Image: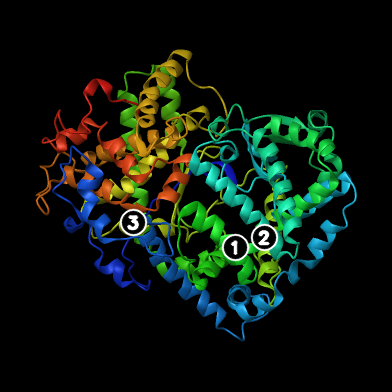
Amino acid sequence: MKYSFSSLISGLIAIAIITACSGNKKESPEAKVYPAFEVSNMDTTILPGDDFFEYVNGMWIKNNPIPADKDNWSAFQELYERNRENIRSIIETAASKQDAPTGSVDKQIGMFYNTGMDTVKIEKQGVEPLKDLFSKIDSITTIADVQSMAAYLQKYNISALFYVFPNADQKNSEMVIANFYQSGIGLPDRDYYFRTDADSRNILNAYKVHLTKIFVLLKDQQEVAQKNAETVLKIETQLAKSSFTNVENQDPQKTYNKMTIEELAELSPEFNWQAYMQNLGYPQIREMNVYQPVFLKELSAMMKTVPVENWKTFLRWSLINHASAYLSSDFENQNFDFYYRTLSGQDQNEPRWKRVLDETSVSLGEAIGQLYVKEYFSPEAKQRMIELVGNLRESLGQRIENLTWIGPDTKKEAQAKLEKMNVKVGYPDKWRDYSGLKITEDSYVMNILNSGNFEFVYEMNKVGKPVDRTEWLMTPQTVNAYYEPSKNEIVFPAGILQPPFFNMNADDAVNYGGIGLVIGHEMTHGFDNMGRQFDKDGNLRDWWTAADVKSFNEHTQILVEEFNKFEVLDSLFINGKLTLGENIADLGGATVAYNAYQLSLQGKPAVDPIDGFTGNQRFFLSFAQIWRNNMKEQQLRKRVLTDEHSPARYRVNGTVFNMPEFYAAFPEVKSGNKLFREEATRPVIW
């Protein structure tokens, strides 16, 4: 996904890479033998010019059905599962240490994991661990109490009404300020409440049934539960109506609305912001960025029009919706039935150890990450990544210099931004201290909530302080990567440095088509339709000439219109505006990575073909193979409606057929092939 919530302007892309470990590092059998590229995965009955994605991955798609406990199966999922086994080894080793000292990392990891695996206790407890929180909600009598309870839940990272989080001031990137962001809906996106097609109506009806069943599990009578479901749905629909669309939320200018607390009170007078910040524990915060002012204005109005009893029902739902996955099987199964089976098409829940492992890895992220890099990350991989980033930086610099559609002033600023772009590889230089995290043997769900509180306090304590540029937004074991506009940095955690995306034993063409694409993609995010609005220091500043902005918009509009025409399912098309940033990064990343591969040859003759394919061809084969994917129709539909990334097939085909280098590598692709694009229709961006 493009944006993580720890920082809503952090560019993310879920793609993966590796190195074979060496020295005293543990080596998995997969890492030792993982092939650079498997021709057996190809379907050569498909012409590369008709569907390059299918040509490269067709047999893999046929031979890799989606497991019952997944909504998709992909190269990314394959790596994610291998990585889980590594993390499992670390966590289960810690969990087995009965004599670990109190307060030690091993003790914290062990208690957290073991409480999650103790299903006997979890079944016996039911919702009992949440009794005090439900009692607080039940005692509400006034709107002031509603707002106070919302703040109380917020401290556990339960964002019933809106998110509160720290981030660099987008126009003063050296300082951290508080941010408010719309929330309050239980469906994936605000448009789910308003679409009128049959699939959307079915989901909305299923959601109402889900709400009713959850209230029944909370011991409400059926009639009362149905009424409560209607109440929640009505409130959520109002909140959704005042929410920005996913495209509007991508506009950094539209979502930058810095206010004092007095201005916020004027915008939304029915909400007592002084009391709210006091109840959060941060009365000293006097200014903040409001991403969606119209949302808070409507929320304020609803404080007068929505009865207190209805708000109590809504807060009960907010609490149980956040906690259901960590409670007894009746709640857990109902949560799975709607959010996974109905919305994503997943037939079965994953084994419990995987779910608990993921929560442990998130809640004690860098504590586990510190152990992870000792076991599974080699210094050679870090050094090779740094070298590759240097090559990609040189390549992108050449591309910028040679572009004809931007002028010298904009080029100069772009080169300065590229030069200053910081690179982080593997793991942070300093580690977080988790000694303040309260973990007990009493309750899994309370360990989850206490972890949320620990994280909330840790994050909010940054407000009003200088930005810590050494901090990471992902843990080392995360299989992902990101670009951070406010820091102008690209970050590659150790977890993503694994096959099939980066393989120390693979030929350069394959690595440039895999990890090179990843690097180029993240670099290009600094110059996409959103990233280009931030300068070399991470400030939201217009450093483009008006003529170059116009030219940029003309070139990118070609990409918007191209992707708008991709019909993923019957009458369901990709949203070219929503996916524009990722599509720019894919096209730019592939182009820059290909150019870097050519530079790496240093003018030497082309390498001998491998498996009958030239180096240039293997670059594109590698690019296509990292996106091999099978996906349930429900999940695919949800992705198209909500995800900034285009589906895998279109990330491949929508990129390569815009690249003249692809046509040169595969001269058999000609006019008359299904996906051939005339040169005049191909956008040239970065």
Residue 180: give x, y in percent of width and height: 69, 40
Q: Nearer the viewer, mark 3 or mark 1?
A: 1
Label 1: how many Cα within 10 Å (few below 14, some 14–19, many 20+): some
Are the residues flagged by discs 2 and 1 in contact, CB closer than 8 Å? yes
Q: Quadrant of residue 600?
A: top left
User: Most extreme residue toward the top, as rendered?
Assistant: 547
* Callout 3: SS: helix
Q: Is residue 5 visible?
A: no
Residue type of the residue flagged with mark 2: Ile
N-terminal of the two: label 2 or label 3?
3
Left or right position of 453 against 411? right
Q: Label 3: which residue?
A: 75
Q: Label 2: which residue?
A: 214
Residue 316: give x, y in percent of width and height: 75, 56
Q: Label 1: which residue?
A: 334
For residue 18, above or below residue 510: below
Q: Nearer the viewer, mark 2 or mark 3?
A: 2
Left or right position of 105 against 142? left
